[in-house]
Amino acid sequence: MMTDVFVEYMVKKKIGAKDMLIAVGATFGGLILIFIGLILARFLPMLPFLVLCGSIYGVYKVISMRNLEFEYSVTNGDITVDKIMNRKSRKRLTSFDAKAIEEMGKYTENAQRLKNRRVDKTIFASEYDDGRDAWYIIAKSRKTGTTLLVFSPDERCIEAIKPFMDRRLRFEIFGRN
């Protein structure tokens, strides 16, 4: 008789070059809007204040939404991945059953081959933008179709997934472990 399995793991995404570029672009865009508001101040005196407030808020929102965490949950073979933005809002990225896993392995060793693989949705939920130290899973999900998930699980997550996978696939990936 199998006991219930529940494992949760959270990963904070490291700030990368893409995040920095978005922050610089948002700041630059906000400054341009403020400048345009100042030019139009001659016609509408209240406009610069509104544009200033709106620009500051918009830049803050864009930058703060890049503060990401990913939560992986494994509950009796059901795998869910959520994205948490700025510790305020949560979005379900995907969920699927471990029996639906078609392929799994270390991402860095298979990255080139996976880029040419046809999938309905690709989800990067790993600690680093380049996928270092990450695993990948290709699985069928009711919500997202054939999904390539790149994620950074700990050993407990991997061990929680193993018993619920197809035996043949588990042996192919992990050997007799």
Image: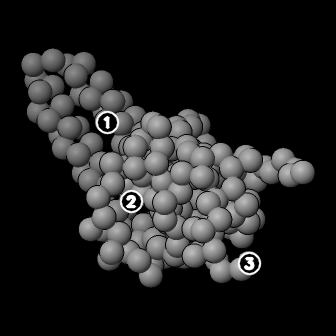
Residue drawn at x 40%, y 50% is 146
Q: Is residue 121 visible?
A: yes
According to the image, label 3 marks what residue? 177
Q: Amino acid at mark 1?
A: Ser
Mark 2 and mark 1 in contact (Cβ < 8 Å)? no
According to the image, label 2 marks what residue? 19
Residue lying furthest front: 168
Choose between 176 and 132: the one closer to the eye: 176
Query: Tag on residue 132?
Result: none
SS class of the residue under badge 2? helix
Q: CA distance from mark 1 to mark 3?
A: 55 Å
Q: CA distance from mark 3 to mark 2?
A: 39 Å
Q: Badge 3 local density, few (<14 within 10 Å), some, or many (20+)?
A: few
Q: Nearer the viewer, mark 3 or mark 2?
A: 3
Q: Amino acid at mark 2?
A: Asp
Q: Quadrant of the C terminus?
A: bottom right
Side of 70 where 123 appears, left or right: left
Residue drawn at x 33%, y 54% is 119
Side of 83 where 24 appears, left or right: left
According to the image, label 1 marks what residue? 55
Q: Nearer the viewer, mark 1 or mark 3?
A: 3
